Image (cartoon, grey):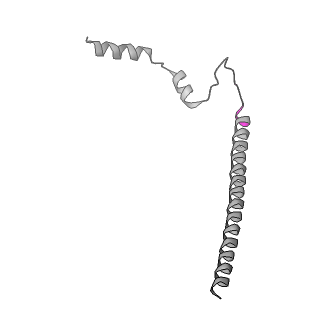
Amino acid sequence: MNSHQSLFAHAAMQQPTGTLSDDRAQAFRPVEGGNELQSGEKLLVEAYAAIWIILFAMIFLSWRRQKQIDQRIDALEAAVQKARADAGQGTS
């Protein structure tokens, strides 16, 4: 028997047999003795809260930026009107 055949034979002996492996494939079995740190419901609520906070932050920052752009446009329009008025007075 070569080394590959002996490895396969060893692996075959380590495989669980019978209904235990079938039960694992078909049913949920919680881990015994494990410590659950957070519940799934709490994680879901936290995820939704984080998404809403990010969304509101993006909207607020966009609103502030738009407000600054509007102020800049108003200043530029005023400068253009003043330049037109000054140019109109100089040619008369």
Q: Nearer the viewer, residue 53 or 40?
A: 53
**Quarter holding the C terminus?**
bottom right
Q: Quadrant of residue 24?
A: top right
**Residue at screen point 70% across, 72% down:** 78
**Quarter holding the N terminus?**
top left
In the picture provided, is 44 more to the left or to the right than 13? Answer: right
**Residue at screen point 64% across, 80% down:** 87
Is residue 38 part of the magenta span, yes or no? Answer: yes
Q: Nearer the viewer, residue 2 or 88?
A: 88
Residue sitting farthest toward the bottom: 92
Q: Nearer the viewer, residue 72 or 90?
A: 90
Position above or below: 45 against 78 = above
Q: Quadrant of residue 91?
A: bottom right
Magenta span: helix, strand or loop, mainly? loop
At which x and y percent is residue 10? 38, 13
In the picture provided, is 7 more to the left or to the right than 71? Answer: left
Is residue 5 part of the magenta span, yes or no? Answer: no
**Residue at screen point 64% across, 83% down:** 90
Residue sitting farthest toward the left: 2
Position above or below: 25 against 81 = above
Segment tinted magenta in the rendering:
36-41
Position above or below: 49 against 11 = below
**Residue at screen point 28% across, 12% down:** 3
At which x and y percent is residue 69? 67, 62
In the picture provided, is 16 more to the left or to the right than 92? Answer: left
At which x and y percent is residue 77? 68, 72
